[in-house]
Amino acid sequence: MSPFLSHLFARKTLRFRLFILFTILSALTIAAFTSFYLAQQRQSSIERLTQDGRLVITALKSGIRLPLYAEYREGIATCIAESLDNSAVTAIRVFNHDNILLAEGKGPAVKLGGETISVREEVLIKDLNYTPEALLLGEDYTRSRVIGYIEVTMNMQSLTSQLRNLYRMALILSLAFWGGATLLGYILLRHITAPFQNLLAGIREIESGNLSPEITFSHGDETEQAAIAVLDLATSLRQREEENKRLNDELVRSLRLEIREEKKKLMAKLINTNRMTSLGLLVSSMAHEINNPNGSIRLTNEYLSKMWQAAIPVLDSTRNMVGEFTLCGLPYGQAREEIQSACANIGRCTERIEQVIRDLRNYSLGERLSQESMVMINDVATAAVSILRAHGRREDVSIVTELGEDIPQVKGNPKQLEQVLLNLIMNAAQAYDDKKGEVRVTTSYAADSGEVLVEVSDRGRGIDAEEMPRIFDPFYSTRIDRGGSGLGLYISKFIVEEHGGSIGVDSKPGEGSTFRVSLPIMMTEQDS
């Protein structure tokens, strides 16, 4: 395979997909126009041959009326013989008004054989007979009447040969034009998508931990704005990492001095910074790696939709002329609707992707909400599960929700409660190591104690008895060597207790763990 094809088919990139779409669309367009042109040429050639036959009939009519009226066969045969000088005439037949063959002559084209076309016309004569009754009634006494028919058969072999040469030349020109258009399309697509490839390389550097990437871009277009946004995001991430380190140091000092008020302030900042640092990388890799191709897909879809709308009249005209034909393996009528539906579906899907990215950004940029908000715990659980599913870090671990009905509201901050569930669900998923498993999230209401319960269960490796007393201690983690910070459960316990609730765990080594969060319900005046 040539280097050109090897590079093109190495990965199914956006450039590859756009190239395939352009190639297919250009092939269909060229085929449609070529088919329309050839059909027009064939129809025009048949009409010319038919017109030649009518000319032969017209010339024959001038001298055959009297012999035909008298049904004088020898005279008719003589007139036919005088009209057989046309090289395309196969036969001339003359019939009386009862459609009985009176005479027939074979032309020079009868030796050619093959496909023929026949032209038939009436021979009329003025009827001068009239009656007094016809005169009184005002009838037309000069009307014409049919005295016979002339049928001329024309040979189509020369026409077929011409059309065959025309088809061959049209096919060669179409293939040459399609090849040139395909090559030009690849060159244009390569030029257009090159800035996006550079931008993607810069984003991958950020993903690998290099927060000072070098990104080349074209000045004055959208790629410049996207590159500036990525560089700004990398700068913001560096600042957040520095801020996170500083806050961690301050948190250690505040814990040693046991200053509760200072601890609360630093913990609130740590919660926000922890959330922003973890989600900043996620949003940077998703927002800019997905939005840019998604925008290109949307623009390409609009362009293809316009091209398809422009091609529909031509295809409809072709169907009206040649009948139903096959397009992409389907009847044209069905393919017409399928393509329009596919374009509309692409538009809806790109809008949905954009909305998901917008929700993730809103989450990562979310502000601190009041602790007095009224929160539906089912909404919090659904939001946390949606974010983790969109993250897609552990595709081999499924998350199952069992949300109770008629659960009262609780008082608190929905974003902080989301952070608690995110930490618990991620810990449950990590309990399976690299194995497949299931995490179950359950919500319910304990009416006897007036508490809303949230349980996060797994069947992973469980927690050893000697580790159980320390799992909620700050900076204690069994996964330090795998990136654990030891703050997830500590922060979760702090948030739950700030909401007036409690958090506990039941676990057996090798059988899994269940973390249970209890929150007091939001009492109304009627309840009190």
Image (cartoon, rainbow, N blue to C red):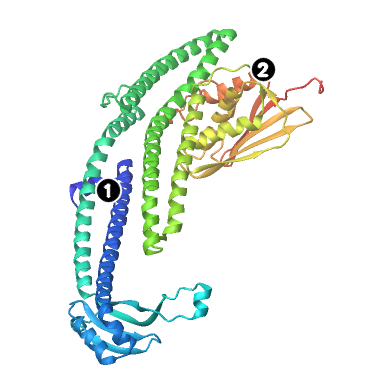
Q: Residue at x 49, y 75 (%)?
A: 135
- Please tell me whether mark 2 or mark 1 is closer to you in this view: 1
| Separation of residues labelled 2 and 1 (CA atoms) | 57 Å
Q: Which mark is residue 9?
A: 1
Q: Is residue 291 left or right of residue 169?
A: right
Residue 165 pos. (x, y %): 18, 66
Can you see residue 463? no
Res 470 → quadrant: top right
Q: Residue at x 25, y 46 (%)?
A: 8
Vertical arrangement, residue 100 with respect to residue 416, above or below: below
Question: Tag 1 or tag 2, which sits nearer the N-term?
Answer: 1
* Amino acid marked by disc 1: Phe
Q: Is residue 36 left or right of residue 241?
A: left
Q: Residue at x 44, y 17 (%)?
A: 244
Residue 136 pos. (x, y %): 52, 75
Vertical arrangement, residue 20 with respect to residue 420, above or below: below
Instruction: Kindly identify which residue carries mark 2.
Output: 372
Residue 90 pos. (x, y %): 23, 81
* Amino acid marked by disc 2: Glu
Can you see residue 523? yes
Q: Quadrant of the C terminus?
A: top right
Q: Nearer the viewer, residue 424 or 414?
A: 414
Marker count (numbered): 2
Residue 5 pos. (x, y %): 22, 49
Res 91 → quadrant: bottom left
Q: Tag 2's secondary structure?
A: loop
Q: Is residue 521 left or right of residue 191?
A: right
